[in-house]
Amino acid sequence: MHWKPDRKSHLTIHEQIKEWMRTRIERGDWTVGTKLPTQRKLAAQFEVNRSTINLALDELKADGLLESRVGSGTFVANNSWNVLLNKSQPNWQQHIDASIHKPNYHTIQLINEYEQYDHIIRLGTGELSPELLPTKQIERSLKSLSLDSRAIGYSEPQGSNKLRSVLCEYLKKRGIDTAPENILIVSGAIQALQLIAIGLLEEGAIIFQENPSYLNSIHPFQSAGMRMMPIQRDGNLTETLRIAKRRKQSLFYCVPTLQNPTGRNWTSEERQILYETCAQLQIPIIEDDVYHELLFEQSSSPSLKSLDRSGQVLYVGSVSKTLSPGLRIGWVVAPEPVIQRLADIKMQSDYGSSAFSQEIVAHWLSSGIYESHILQLREQLKIRALFVEKILEEQFKSVATWEKSEGGFYIWIRFNEPIVNKAMFLNLLKKNVLINPGYIYDTTDIHHIRVSYAYASLEELKEGLNCIIELVC
Amino acid sequence: MHWKPDRKSHLTIHEQIKEWMRTRIERGDWTVGTKLPTQRKLAAQFEVNRSTINLALDELKADGLLESRVGSGTFVANNSWNVLLNKSQPNWQQHIDASIHKPNYHTIQLINEYEQYDHIIRLGTGELSPELLPTKQIERSLKSLSLDSRAIGYSEPQGSNKLRSVLCEYLKKRGIDTAPENILIVSGAIQALQLIAIGLLEEGAIIFQENPSYLNSIHPFQSAGMRMMPIQRDGNLTETLRIAKRRKQSLFYCVPTLQNPTGRNWTSEERQILYETCAQLQIPIIEDDVYHELLFEQSSSPSLKSLDRSGQVLYVGSVSKTLSPGLRIGWVVAPEPVIQRLADIKMQSDYGSSAFSQEIVAHWLSSGIYESHILQLREQLKIRALFVEKILEEQFKSVATWEKSEGGFYIWIRFNEPIVNKAMFLNLLKKNVLINPGYIYDTTDIHHIRVSYAYASLEELKEGLNCIIELVC
C-alpha cells in the first residue's frame, strides 16, 4: 500500500528512492526541517538493504536537499527549497513550537510509534490483546444491527438516546441511579477529561491527583493551563486540600478502583473520607472508573458516584478496556448543567461520537452478551496475571517487589535500585521490548515499571520479562 | 425510556411529578441554579396537561425548592439545598462561567436542541435527509465486513492504514497526489479545525476568512484565543493580507467549492490568486472541501491543494455530507511534520476515531459503492433544489433575491428588508420552523437566511417556506 521501489524499473533501486524523496520534498509533503524516518525504518518499508538507503541519502545530501545533524538524524535541509524551486514555504516548525497544546512526552510518542510494529513485544500496553477481543462476536452482532436512518445522522448533543437509556440500567449495577439527561456519550474517557478541562475550569485551576497518576501521561489539564498537585496517601487530606485550594478553583481526579498505573483499590473507608472531605470543601471529583468490571473478586467498595448526594462527582466510564478500544465510546454521569455544558463543547469539537459505535455498544449492553463476555474476560486476565506473577516470583524476587494483582491489566513493579530511566527504556526498545516506565506517571519516579499482562502473548510476556531481567542483572 | 408518571400509582400524577423533581434535586442531578425544561416540554415528556405541570411547579416553589425568574423560566432555588439537606454543593455555574471554551451562540444551542424534536420543520439543517441516507446499503455492507482484531484495538496515531491508503487513490480524482504518511483521519472536518487551532497556531494568531463564513457559527479558533478577520471578495487581497498579518502568525480558512453558507464557487482564477498570494506571504491555507462531490455539473476549478507545491495548504475532507454524518469520519492532507503534530494531539484528545467507522468508509470508497451512491445523491439533491427554487420564484420574488444553486445543500436568500434578526428566528420557532439565520455566519448580517433543501421533506420545505412568507408579508 505504501510506496516501494519497482524491481522491474529501468532505474536502479537507489535512484528510484532518490527520486521518490525528491518528489516528496518538491510537493511539500516533506517541508523544510522535516525529520526523515530512521534508515532502519526506511529499509524495512522499502524492503531494501540499509546500504541502499545510505547511498540514496548521501547523494541527496550532496545535492543540498538533505542534511545530517549529529545524534539526531537526517533532515530536509534549510535551503532544499531554494535549491529545488527558488521559492519559500511556511515555517511549520515555528507554527508548532508557538502553538497552545503540549506535545506528548517523547517517551510516549515513541510508545505510540513503536506500538504499530509487529516485531515489538508490548509489555506496557494498556489494552486487551487481539486474542482477548471478542472480534468474531462483534462481527456477528454487526450482522444483526438494524439501523434507523435518524440514528446515523448528526447525533443529539448528548449522544444516542437509546444508548443513554441502556446505560441507566447498566449503571444501576454499579449503585448509580441516574437519568438519560444526566449522561453524555464521549469518544472514550480521555475525551471526557479534555471536555472537563476546557469546559468547567478556569486557567490556573488546581487538579489534585494521586501519585503516581495516569493523568501525568496525558495532558488534557496541563495543556489548558491547569496546575497538577499530587496528593500523598498518608498525609492529612483535609488540611492539604484546604491549604492548596486557597482562592483558585480546583478538582480532584482519581481512579479508586484498579488504579492506573498501580492497580490498587481504595478501601470503602478511603472512598468515604475522600467524598466527605471534597463535599465539605466543595471540590468536585472526577471518578475515572474504566477498570471496575475487571476486578477478579467482586468488591464491596462502592463507587464514589454512588455515595454522591450533592452533584459533586463527575463519573467517567468506557468500554475501551472491556469490549474494544476501537469503538471509542465512553460516558460521563454528572448534574444536568454540567452535562449540557460539556455537550455544547462536544458539539463544537466533533459533533458527537460515531453513531455506529453507539449502536454496537447499546446492542451489547442491552442484549446480555456484554455481561457474559466480561465473565470470560475476567477469567482470561486472571490466568495471565498468575502467569506473569509466577515468572516474577522465579526471577525478579531479588531485584524488585510488587503486589499481587487484584484485577485489570497491570502489575506495578518496583525495582530496588533506581534504574528505570530513559536509557533503560531505550535499551529495551533496542531489544524490541516496549515498556511503560514509571516516570511517565510521576516524573520523579525511577524505580517502577507498569507491566501489563493484558496485551502481549504468554510467550512474549515471558521473553519480554527475560529481556528486562537480563538488562538489570 | 425516560421517566413518566405511573397512572396506576396510588399517588396523584402531580404528586408523582413533585416527588420525581424533588429526587432529582436531592441527588444532585439538578444542582442549584439548574434551569428546568419549559412547561411545554415537561408536559410533552410526561404526557400530561400543562396545568398538571403548573400545579407541581407551584407547590415546589411554595416549598422553597424552585423559583421563577421573570422572562427566563423556572430554576432550582438557591436555598433548595439548604431546605432539603442543610448541605452545600459545588457551584457549577461559577465553574462554567470561568472556564476556557466559548459556549455556542444561543441561537445555535436552540438549533441543536430543537433539531431533536420530530414536530419541527428543519429548514436550515446542513445534513442529508433520512430518506437520502443510504441506510439500507450501509446495513448490508456491515454484514460483509470482516474485522481484524488488530484493527479494532487502539488506532495508529494517524488512523487506519487501510483507510489512508484507500484515500490516496480517492484523492487522485480530486487532483491531489499524496501518501498515507500525509493523511490524518479525524472525527469529521470540525475536529480538524479544533486540532489545527490548538496544534499549529499561537494565541492571538489571525484567522482570515470569507464573509460570511461557516467558521463564525462554530468556535474552534475563537475559543483558542485567535482573532477572526473577514476578507471582502472585492478588496485588494495582497494589501489586506500584508497589512493585517504584520508580526502575528496567520492562516486563511476558506471553502472554495460550494461555500457554506452562500453555496458559491470560486473561479479558477480566484483560486490561483489566493494560492499565489498566500504562498508569497507564507500564509498557510485551510481548504475545507467537504461539499465538492455534490456539484451538480462537473467543475473545471481545481482544488487549492492540487495547486500546492510548497506544503502551504491543509486540505480537509469528510464523508459527513455525502455518506453519513453519524460515521464521524474526515481527513486532513498536509505536510508530514504537520500531520505528525496533529496526530500527537489527537492521541491526547480521543485516542483516534472509531475503528468501525473507518472500516465502513474504507469499504465504501474502495468497493465503488460510494461512487455510484454519489451519482444518485446528486440527482436527488438537484430535484430538491429545483423544487425549492420554484417555490421561491412563485412567492419570494417581491421580497428577496437569491442565486440558483450549483450544488450542495444551500440557497442563500437575501431579504430586501433587514428583517432576519433573533426575533424572526424565535417567531418561526414558535411556528415549529427552524431556520439558520445569516447572523450566525456574520454577526452584522440581518438580511440573509441559509435555506437547506437537503433535510426536510418536499412537503415540509413547502410548508416551512410558506410560514416564512406569511411572517414577512
Image: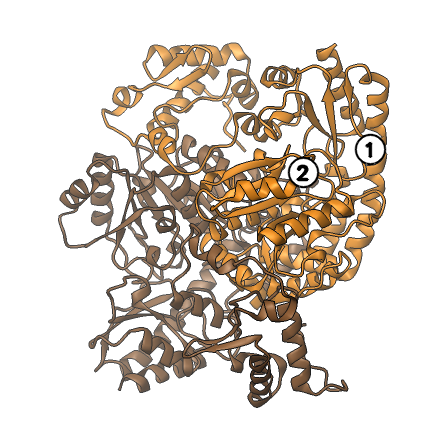
Chain colours: A orange, B brown
- Do marks 1 and 2 share a chain? no
Q: Nearer the viewer, residue B218 or B233?
A: B218
Residue A234 is drawn in which quadrant?
Answer: top right
Where does the C terminus of chain B fall, quadrant-wise? bottom left
Crowd class of label 1 (few under 14; some 14 to 19; many from 20; radius 10 Å): many
- Eyeballing the image, is B110 above or below B355? below
Q: Amino acid at mark 1?
A: Arg
Q: Position of residue B227 (x, y in %)?
A: 28, 48
Label tally: 2
**Residue receiving disc 1:** A384
Residue A295 is drawn in which quadrant?
Answer: top right
Q: Amino acid at mark 2?
A: Arg
Q: State the residue at coordinates (33%, 27%).
A: A26
Q: Nearer the viewer, residue A384 or B165?
A: A384
Q: Position of residue A146 (x, y in %)?
A: 67, 64
- Eyeballing the image, is A20 above or below A206? above
Indicate the secondary structure of the residue bearing disc 1. Answer: helix
Q: Is residue B59 left or right of residue A21?
A: right
**Residue receiving disc 2:** B150
Q: Position of residue A344 (x, y in %)?
A: 48, 59
Crowd class of label 2 (few under 14; some 14 to 19; many from 20; radius 10 Å): some
Please report, as a chain letter, where disc 1 is located: A
